[in-house]
Image (cartoon, grey):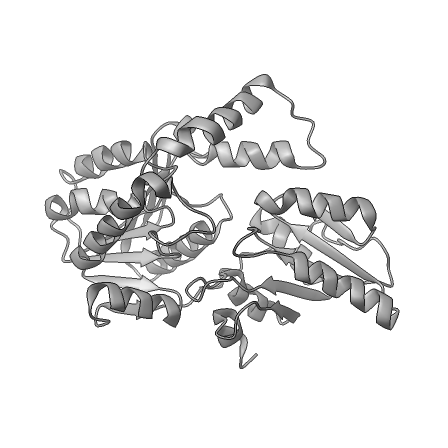
């Protein structure tokens, strides 16, 4: 089969969607399908990569790719020496102006380049399947615009998080676009031939939206474990006799807050004379001020910016306990849990609700 995948996020990024579709596209190519991935420009990554049965094409400007998020992460890293006026100005304009007016999300400008390129491919290929991937939601708008022209037999919409109800980490200005978000998410769900979600909570939510669950399928997070390079910095511990707890990923104050986890470590150290080190690897987001304030008071909290996959896997292997903070919603399942299971490490799962989908995923582990 000839399969076209449209996703804003792809390797070398290590985000959940990028990792998921790197693994799936390579697996499809390995069993003989011809896969073309249309994605965004990313740093110095080649514009076109061709392997056996797999072609990756990067379109759009680097300025409208995921570069701003990476710039922010680097600038906020404790070890960063970047203080460029351009970097600070770009982040300031994005936070105070651009993100308040764009729709549907930060990938909105990439949409036009992606549509143009997909249409140009139509003169060279016919497609048996079209797959669009979110987050961000923009990729589904590309699919909606080219579906008829592609004449693909099936359009599959792969969803990491629902679009219209991400109140904890909104993709756009909900005051302006709340109703529009809901209309378009419903339109995409109805137009697609099949919808893939990661957990039963999201399946129930979408089934209520469209009045049926027949086209909605649960495909849980996929573990993609590339060969990890030996990393001399993988040993994250500072005290050799301490229990090292590692949380890899992104934090959000409203939906994935580390406050109770920190209290738990304090209590363990005080009541049971246990030495703990709590390591956060990734984007602290709007939890950064709280964590940095805690880190100034205690010595057991350590932070490190996002890592490449090759760095993160050995770092996770060296931890004593891998930590997951369950989301405050019933329909968001952290993708890293599949990797936790593959690594065979002890897992601490901190939940905030009785029907936590992380607990459901881990119940037999």
Q: Residue furthest front?
A: 175
Who's the residue at 67% across and 52% down the image? Answer: 280
Note whether 113 is above or below 245 in the view shown: above
Q: State the image coordinates of residue 69 (x, y, percent, origin top left).
A: 51, 36
Please name whichever residue, 299 or 246, is drawn nearer the observer in this view of the structure.
299
**Residue 360 at x, y percent in the picture:** 49, 76
Q: In the visual, does 129 lie left or right of 197?
A: left
x%, y% of residue 129?
A: 21, 56
**Quarter assignment of residue 283:** top right
- Quadrant that contains the N terminus: bottom left
- Residue 21 visible here: yes
| Picture residue at 62% right of the left edge, 72% below the top | 344
How many numbered marks does the figure carry?
Answer: 0
Above/below status of 166 relative to 171: below
Residue that appears at 35% across and 31% down = 101
Give the quadrant of residue 105: top left
Residue 347 vertical placement versus 319 (above, below): below
Q: Is residue 218 left or right of residue 319?
A: left
Direction top: furthest residue:
85
Apparent side of residue 327 relative to residue 116 in the rendered image (left or right): right
The percent coordinates of residue 155 (x first, y second) are: 20, 56
Asked whether, in this view, residue 170 is left or right of residue 243, the answer is left
Image quarter of the C terminus: bottom right
Q: Is residue 43 visible?
A: no
For residue 62, above or below residue 78: above
Is 240 or 178 nearer to us in this picture? 178
């Amino acid at each position: 089969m000839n399969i076209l995948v449209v996703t804003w996020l792809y390797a070398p990024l290590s985000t959940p969607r990028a990792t998921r579709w790197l693994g799936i596209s390579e697996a499809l190519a390995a069993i003989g399908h011809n896969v073309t991935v249309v994605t965004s420009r990313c740093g110095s990554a080649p514009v076109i990569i061709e392997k056996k049965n797999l072609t990756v094409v990067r379109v759009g400007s680097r300025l409208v790719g995921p570069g701003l998020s990476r710039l922010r992460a680097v600038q906020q890293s404790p070890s960063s020496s970047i203080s460029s006026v351009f970097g600070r100005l770009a982040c300031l304009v994005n936070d105070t102006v651009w993100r308040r007016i764009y729709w549907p999300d930060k990938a909105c400008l990439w949409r036009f380049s992606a549509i143009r390129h997909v249409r140009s491919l139509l003169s060279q290929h016919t497609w048996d399947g079209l797959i669009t991937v979110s987050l961000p939601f923009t990729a589904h708008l590309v699919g909606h615009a080219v579906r008829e022209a592609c004449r693909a037999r099936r359009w599959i919409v792969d969803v990491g998080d629902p679009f219209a109800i991400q109140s904890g980490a909104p993709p756009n200005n909900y005051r302006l676009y709340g109703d529009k978000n809901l209309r378009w998410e419903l339109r995409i769900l109805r137009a697609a031939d099949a919808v893939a979600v990661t957990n039963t909570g999201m399946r129930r939510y979408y089934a209520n939206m469209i009045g049926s669950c027949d086209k909605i399928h649960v495909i849980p997070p996929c573990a993609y474990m590339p060969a990890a390079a030996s990393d001399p910095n993988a040993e994250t511990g500072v005290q050799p006799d301490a229990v090292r707890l590692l949380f890899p990923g992104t934090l959000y104050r409203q939906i994935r807050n580390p406050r109770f986890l920190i209290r738990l470590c304090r209590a363990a150290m005080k009541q049971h004379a246990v030495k703990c080190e709590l390591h956060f690897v990734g984007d602290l987001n709007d939890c950064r001020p709280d964590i940095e304030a805690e880190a100034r008071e205690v010595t057991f909290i350590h932070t490190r910016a996002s890592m490449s996959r090759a760095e993160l896997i050995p770092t996770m292997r060296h931890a004593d306990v891998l930590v997951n903070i369950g989301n405050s919603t019933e329909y968001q399942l952290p993708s890293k849990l599949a990797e936790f299971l593959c690594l065979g490490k002890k897992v601490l799962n901190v939940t905030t609700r009785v029907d936590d989908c992380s607990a459901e995923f881990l119940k037999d582990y």
